[in-house]
Structure formats: C-alpha cells, structure tokens
Image: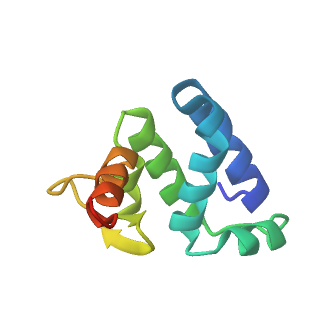
Amino acid sequence: MVKTYADLYLDARKALLPIDGTYAANMAREILCAASGKTPEAIIADRGLYASEEICLRVEAYVRRRLEGEPIAYILGQWDFYDMTLTVTPDVLIPRDDTMAVCDLAIMPGG
C-alpha cells in the first residue's frame, strides 16, 4: 500500500515514539530520507506526494529494525563525525559524542 511522504513520516514517528521518545521525530526523518534518497527539504516539499511501494516497504523495514533495537547508524549505513560522513556497518564501532570529546582533547593545543 502506498502512502504520502507525510503519512510515512507520521507513521514512522508514531511507531518509534516508545523507544526513541523525544528523538522519534528525528529518527523518522532520517529513516524516511535514507529510504527515499531525498533530502529533508525535499521530503517537506513532496509531503503531499505518494511514495513508491518500494520506498514504503523500505521505510517499514527500517522502522522494524529500529524497533528491534538496531542502532540507527547501522540502519542508515553511515554516520556523521567531525564534518565527515563515515560508512558504518555492524563490523565497526559507531562514533559517539564521547568519542568527539576525546578527539577535542587530543586536538587542543597543549592537550
């Protein structure tokens, strides 16, 4: 069953709310962008358009994986760190905020 981009987003956000809480909206947006290949701005512009069945199925699969506890970085296959987009698989560790703090300390002059 195909849905509009707005409905896909709203359904994903509702499904993710129990596990992602206040971050459910961000997670839903990231999933919809990854599943569709669209930017957040394009999703907003196209919110009334119907997504293909392939995109709908991909969003559902990504949401299911997230609900099963898989980290969003593994679902998306990439993660931003220090203005770099890194490819992320289950074979690598996901850069976290504390990793950035360690890098900041290492980069600081005299650190």
Residue shown at the point (17%, 57%) measured from the top left: 92
* Percent position of residue 79, x then y: 39, 62
Q: Is residue 18 above or below residue 7?
A: above
Residue 56 appearing in the image:
no
Q: Quadrant of residue 13?
A: top right
User: At 40% across and 48% down in the image, what residue appears?
Assistant: 97
Locate residue 76: give its quadrant.
Answer: bottom left
Q: Residue furthest front?
A: 110
Q: Residue furthest left?
A: 91
User: Which quadrant does the C terminus fall into?
Assistant: bottom left
- How was the colour assigned to the protein in this rendering? rainbow
The answer to whether residue 94 is left or right of residue 50 is left
Between 13 and 51, which is closer to the camera in this rendering?
Answer: 13
Q: Which residue is found at the position 62% from the left and 75% from the top?
A: 38
Nearest to the observer: residue 60 or residue 16 = 16
In the rendered structure, the answer to whether residue 106 lies left or right of residue 56 reads left
Looking at this view, is 108 or 4 the one in front? 108
Q: How many marks?
A: 0
Q: Is residue 52 left or right of residue 108?
A: right
Name the spot of residue 73 as percent of width and height, x first: 37, 54
Residue 59 visible to the viewer: yes
| Residue in the foreground of this view, choosing between 110 and 12 | 110
Q: Quadrant of the N terminus?
A: bottom right
Q: Position of residue 102 (x, y in %)?
A: 29, 51
Q: In which quadrant of the rendered view does residue 44 lie?
A: bottom right
